[in-house]
Amino acid sequence: MSLDLMKRVWLLDIPSTPKIVLLSLADQANETGVCWPSQPQIARRCSLSERAIRDQLCWLEEARVIRRHVRAGV
């Protein structure tokens, strides 16, 4: 867990749904900001559907808040 990343997420002026997804990612990230959670795992943690997670990850990526390296089928 990266407490520094989580603190930075709280300061962002972004909508609540992408913020909760980003908080989940920050909670699972190492100190360099890297994490590899599955979309179903993020959905469970955020109490959102997998479709909502995909939408929020796209939003975060388009807003240049995150960079993703998608690994299909893993």
Image (tube, rainbow, N blue to C red):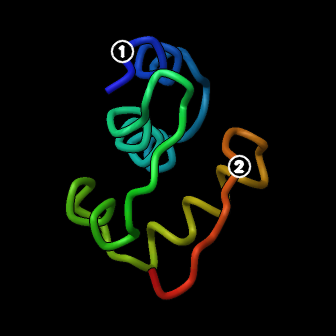
What number is the disc on residue 67? 2
In this view, 34 is above or below 9: below
Q: Helix or strand or loop: what does disc 2 sit on? A: loop
Gap between marks 2 and 1 measured at Cα: 19 Å
| Residue 64 placement (x, y as % from top left) | 78, 42
Instruction: Give the residue type that dot 2 points to.
Output: Arg
- Residue depicted at 43% across the width and 30% down the height: 30
Seen as rendered, the residue at the extreme bottom is: 73
Q: Helix or strand or loop: what does disc 1 sit on? A: helix
Instruction: Give the residue type that dot 1 points to.
Output: Leu
- Residue depicted at 39% across the width and 36% down the height: 23
Q: 56 and 41: which one is in front? A: 41
| Residue 14 placement (x, y as % from top left) | 59, 34
Q: Which residue is mark 1?
A: 3
| Residue 22 placement (x, y as % from top left) | 47, 41
Looking at the rendering, in which quadrant would you find the N terminus? Answer: top left
- Residue depicted at 61% across the width and 25% down the height: 13
In this view, 33 is above or below 73: above
Q: 19 and 36: which one is in front? A: 36
Which of the 4 image quadrants contains residue 43? Answer: bottom left
Report whether 42 appears left or right of 7.
left
Marks 2 and 1 in Cβ contact (< 8 Å): no
- Residue depicted at 57% across the width and 69% down the height: 55
Counting residues from the start of the chain, the first of labels 2 and 1 encountered is 1
Which of the 4 image quadrants contains residue 50? Answer: bottom left
| Residue 10 placement (x, y as % from top left) | 45, 19
The mark tally for this picture is 2
